[in-house]
């Protein structure tokens, strides 16, 4: 089923997709002329497939549940923010805060992500085939951020238990973020993440980063970190 | 907070549509900045152009009367309540004369630049100044949501920072009051309590002291505290700078014919061939420039 | 010793508690973290009085001559605004900061009086949704527990920019309160000290807030009122910006507002008193022609029906109570003296919410301590307190000739101090003088 945002309103399209009649058996949707609209496909909650043909604005597929949303273009701030489950695939580049506070599901970005990719992530898996901007995985609590390209400054600042795997160069690590061991268990784990998205990359070549856990309880000796 | 837009034409293909293209961008940014709007259009002239805003009850004929004997080779273009004075008289001579006239405000000056700004919804402002009829080589624009200062024309952007130069800003500075006081000591004048006016004063003060624009903006990273995406217009093009934390948005679209920048992609969605454009975001703390 | 002490002169600049604090800092090397709000005295509603009835203004009889207290919240853009029976709501306090019994009791009490409660920096619990007739769901920088299903279950959504106790500070919960359930809801390891962001992760500034609000409305079918909560900093500008960003309601929390755990220096030295901030916010709404169209809910040191009445007279549509609601539950009640002593404090002085050892079972996750707060009885206490506030409010409104509390106006007030007169823009009693105001 097709929608044309140059002819229909955002509200009409979102409302339809948020309230799918499962009996209708319509599961595949295409949206043309997104024209940089915001909150397109936010709040989806069924196992449907949506393809957006073009560039979108902020919060595309925000709080996505179960749906599979593919954007054939670039996305603005906060794509798949607070996603609960499902798959969001950005074929172009993502702006800042991609996958912010995401709790589940998978976000794949074929291009680059800008700053704060995976900020405060809470269980989402984010795979960026390009590079990520500064402050990515800031306060990341859980989930996995896989970067095939490079990472800008302060990667993983104040990170909790999320895992970062990076193939390229990391400009600098943030507070309490350190390089961690890539043992067999980790290689297997990363391998599964890559295979699930059909990405051909050698997990052994990645480096892993995570929390040093020294900021978990207030200690006066860490005062310079604050 | 605000919306900022800019477009630099790499060739002459869209010169005549420059105003139309900018109009589309500004209209799209109206919701981010509903209080006031302004734009700077660059169209090279052989003479100097001075854009002034007429105060209430002061008319073009009154202005002409005062300037008749003072400026050489002068033409006047009236657009709503702004007048573009085109004259051979140089800035060193002309600006003091214009500043002396109580009932006008000098909005911008140079050999290319014309600046128009006004209180009101951006969609109304661009209509009022017939932006869609303008042509030129490059332009920047601004839609304003006033944060900590009043909604007045003096509080609107773009701010003139020197000959053919201007500034628009999206964000909020945090040390502008102290900085304003030290700039006043250096002889810079301010008309509003606006933080952007302080950034503009900082830039023009630095340029006055023969520092390059790039070095000025780089120094700004240390001297200006707060959150910002700046676009500065120059005679040949424009420059963009985001602060190191880079929370305020900026996205660039580049084709073989133009470079466009805006706070949101939505503002550029209608530009020609934008779906084939190279779309990227400027990195924090780095001065990007085109045309210079 | 007491004979000598009688004749000794203490230091105004270094009183006993300041000396104790400096010496504590010297021992521990870190700022003091505590709960509740600013302890020091600031200009507040006590410095205003109502004029009442006179030869020119006539009062209403109690009971028979009705005095309406209900208020509609959120009708600017939302399809389903909320009608509250009383203009007093329960402010946001997290499950994590408070125990489950406390949240349950607040819900029962509020629902019995036809008003709302608010979630806090931990997400929505099923118990709270069940016991609250109207539940406001907060969107905070941390986004702990945030999910679209709860957004849809809520009756309103409150985007938190800041709170009065710490405008510019993020949430804080110390390890001793992060038990298994709290840890699971917030997706944190048990027992660690929670660090929270002070800015939202996916927007900064009212221009981007506008787009965020649009997203929230899209996810909830434009049904729910959207509130924007700010701590009292630049209330005049913040109110205008909330309106421009598309909020239905502005929630303004003054410096006296409480917290579960924040640095003492932040609580006492950042933010302005509710009295001054309220004036600014109302001015801003009036200038935008949005007064009563965008509702204003005010919190931060609301204690009695007099405070409620004065806030409404100054232009608020409703008030919100946090610390006072906790006190109705038993916070600082004169019981379990040994347990207060174990914390190094006493009833009436306790601000130890951050320890998780609340002697009365309110701000704790410890099951043994929680037994001291029985939800049904505590819920009745909250209901009684809200009922008292309402009766007091009506008494004062009737005395000033109002059949609807919303008809209370600034002209019904007089100020007892110069500061209050200037901050509230109300004349000093017995004069027509408002300091700093040129008509």
Image (cartoon, coloured by chain):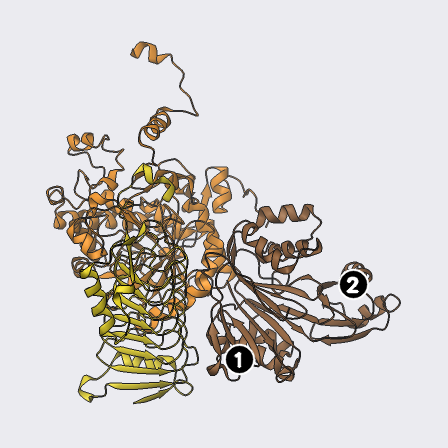
Chain colours: A yellow, B brown, C orange
Q: Is residue C147 visible?
A: no
- Label 1 sits on residue: B255
Question: What residue is shown at x 43% (from left), y 65% (from top)?
Answer: C208
Q: Distance between the residues labelled 2 and 1?
A: 36 Å
Q: In x, y percent, where is residue B216?
A: 62, 56
To the question of a shared chain for discs 2 and 1, the answer is yes
Q: Is mark 2 on a helix, strand or loop?
A: helix
Q: Is residue C425 left or right of residue C134?
A: right
Chain bearing mark 1: B
Chain bearing mark 2: B
- Label 2 sits on residue: B91
Quadrant in the rendering for residue A166: bottom left
Question: Which residue occupies the foreground of this view, C230 or B19?
Answer: B19
Q: In x, y percent, where is residue C285?
A: 47, 59
Dot 2 crowding, Cα within 10 Å, few <14, some 14–19, many 20+: some
Q: In this view, does C312 lie to the left or right of C116?
A: right
Question: Which residue occupies the foreground of this view, C267 or B138?
Answer: B138
Q: Is residue B282 above or below residue A209?
A: below
Q: Is mark 1 on a helix, strand or loop?
A: loop
Q: In x, y percent, where is residue A192?
A: 20, 69
Q: In this view, does A70 lie to the left or right of C113?
A: right
Q: In this view, does C178 lie above or below C9?
A: below
Q: Is residue C421 visible?
A: yes
Determine contact: label 2, label 1, CB under 8 Å.
no
Quadrant in the rendering for residue C110: bottom left
Labels 2, 1: front one: 1
Q: Earlier in the sequence, mark 2 or mark 1?
A: 2
Dot 1 crowding, Cα within 10 Å, few <14, some 14–19, many 20+: some
Quadrant in the rendering for residue A61: bottom left
């Amino acid at each position: 089923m097709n929608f044309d945002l140059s002819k229909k309103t955002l509200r009409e399209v979102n409302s339809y997709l948020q309230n799918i009649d499962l009996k209708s058996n319509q599961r595949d949707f295409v949206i043309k002329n997104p024209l940089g609209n915001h909150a397109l496909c936010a709040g989806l909650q069924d196992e449907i497939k949506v393809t957006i043909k073009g560039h979108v604005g902020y919060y595309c597929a925000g709080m996505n549940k179960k749906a599979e949303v593919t954007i054939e273009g670039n996305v603005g701030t906060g794509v798949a923010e607070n996603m609960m489950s499902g798959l969001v695939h950005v074929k172009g580049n993502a702006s800042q805060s991609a996958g912010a506070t995401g709790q589940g599901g998978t976000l794949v970005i074929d291009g680059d992500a800008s700053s704060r990719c995976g900020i405060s992530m809470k269980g989402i898996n984010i795979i960026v085939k390009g590079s990520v901007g500064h402050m990515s995985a800031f306060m990341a609590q859980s989930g996995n951020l896989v970067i095939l390209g490079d990472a800008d400054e302060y990667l993983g600042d104040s990170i909790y238990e999320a895992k970062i795997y990076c193939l390229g160069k990391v400009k600098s690590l943030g507070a309490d973020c350190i390089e961690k061991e890539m043992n067999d268990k980790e290689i297997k784990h990363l391998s599964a993440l890559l295979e699930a998205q059909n990405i051909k990359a050698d997990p052994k070549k990645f480096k892993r980063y995570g929390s040093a856990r020294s900021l978990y309880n207030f200690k006066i000796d860490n005062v310079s970190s604050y | 907070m605000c919306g900022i837009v800019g477009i630099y034409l790499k060739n002459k293909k869209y010169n005549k549509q420059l105003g139309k293209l900018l109009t589309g961008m500004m209209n799209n940014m109206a919701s981010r900045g509903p209080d006031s709007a302004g734009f700077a259009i660059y169209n090279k002239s052989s003479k100097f152009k001075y854009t002034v805003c007429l105060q209430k009850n002061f008319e073009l004929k009154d202005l002409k009367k005062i300037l008749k004997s003072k400026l050489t080779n002068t033409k006047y273009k009236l657009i709503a309540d702004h007048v573009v004075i085109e004259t051979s008289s140089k800035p060193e001579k002309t600006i003091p004369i214009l500043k002396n006239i109580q009932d006008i405000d000098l909005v911008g000056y140079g050999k290319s630049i014309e600046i128009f700004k006004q209180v009101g919804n951006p969609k109304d402002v661009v209509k009022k100044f017939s932006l869609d009829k303008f042509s030129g080589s490059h332009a920047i624009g601004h839609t304003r949501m006033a944060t900590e200062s009043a909604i007045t024309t003096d509080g609107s952007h773009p701010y003139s920072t020197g000959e053919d130069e201007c500034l628009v800003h999206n964000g909020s500075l945090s040390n502008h009051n102290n900085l304003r006081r030290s700039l006043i000591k250096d002889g810079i004048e301010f008309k509003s309590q606006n933080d952007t006016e302080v950034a503009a004063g900082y830039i023009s003060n630095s340029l006055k002291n023969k520092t390059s624009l790039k070095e000025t903006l780089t120094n700004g990273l240390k001297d200006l505290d707060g959150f910002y995406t700046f676009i500065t217009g120059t005679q040949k093009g424009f420059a963009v700078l985001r602060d190191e934390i880079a929370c305020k948005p900026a996205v660039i679209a580049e084709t073989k014919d133009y470079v466009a920048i805006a706070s949101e992609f939505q503002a550029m969605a209608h530009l020609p061939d934008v779906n084939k454009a190279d779309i990227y975001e400027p990195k924090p703390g780095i001065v990007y420039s085109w045309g210079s | 010793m007491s004979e000598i002490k009688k004749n000794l002169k203490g230091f105004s600049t270094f009183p006993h508690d300041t000396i104790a604090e400096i010496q504590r800092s010297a021992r521990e090397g870190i700022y003091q973290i505590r709960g509740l709000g600013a302890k020091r005295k600031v200009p507040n509603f006590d410095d205003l009085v109502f004029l009442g009835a006179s030869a020119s203004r006539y009062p209403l009889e109690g009971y028979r001559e009705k005095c309406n207290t209900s208020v509609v919240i959120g009708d600017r853009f939302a399809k389903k605004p909320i009608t509250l029976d009383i203009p007093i709501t329960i402010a946001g306090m997290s499950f994590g900061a408070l125990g489950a019994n406390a949240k349950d009791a607040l819900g029962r009490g509020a629902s019995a009086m036809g008003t709302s409660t608010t979630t806090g920096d931990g997400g929505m619990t099923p118990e709270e949704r069940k016991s609250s007739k109207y539940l406001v769901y907060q969107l905070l920088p941390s986004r702990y527990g945030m999910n679209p299903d709860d957004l849809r279950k809520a009756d309103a959504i409150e985007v938190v920019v800041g709170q009065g106790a710490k405008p510019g500070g993020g949430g804080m919960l110390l390890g001793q309160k992060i038990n298994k359930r709290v840890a699971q809801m917030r997706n944190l390891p048990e027992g660690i000290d929670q660090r929270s962001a002070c800015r939202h992760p996916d927007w900064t500034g009212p221009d981007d807030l506008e787009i965020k609000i649009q997203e929230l409305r899209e996810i909830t079918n434009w049904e729910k009122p959207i509130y924007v909560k700010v701590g009292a900093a630049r209330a005049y500008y913040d109110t205008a910006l909330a309106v421009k960003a598309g909020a239905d309601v502005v929630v303004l929390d003054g410096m006296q507002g409480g917290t579960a755990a924040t640095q003492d220096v932040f609580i006492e030295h950042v933010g302005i008193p509710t009295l001054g901030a309220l004036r600014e916010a109302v001015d801003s709404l009036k200038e935008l022609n949005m007064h009563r169209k965008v509702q204003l809910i005010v919190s931060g040191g609301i204690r009695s029906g007099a405070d409620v009445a004065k806030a409404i007279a100054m232009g608020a549509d409703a008030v919100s109570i946090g610390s006072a609601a906790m006190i109705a539950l038993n916070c600082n009640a004169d019981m379990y003296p040994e347990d207060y002593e174990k914390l190094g404090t006493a009833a009436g002085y306790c601000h130890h919410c951050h320890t998780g050892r609340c002697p009365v079972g309110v701000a704790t996750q410890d099951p043994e301590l929680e037994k001291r707060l029985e939800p049904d009885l505590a819920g009745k206490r909250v209901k009684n307190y809200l009922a008292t506030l309402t009766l007091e409010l009506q008494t004062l409104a009737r005395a000033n000739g109002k059949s609807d509390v919303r008809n209370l106006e600034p002209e019904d007030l007089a100020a007892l101090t110069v500061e209050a007169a200037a901050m509230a823009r109300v004349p000093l009693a017995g004069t027509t003088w408002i300091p700093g105001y040129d008509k």
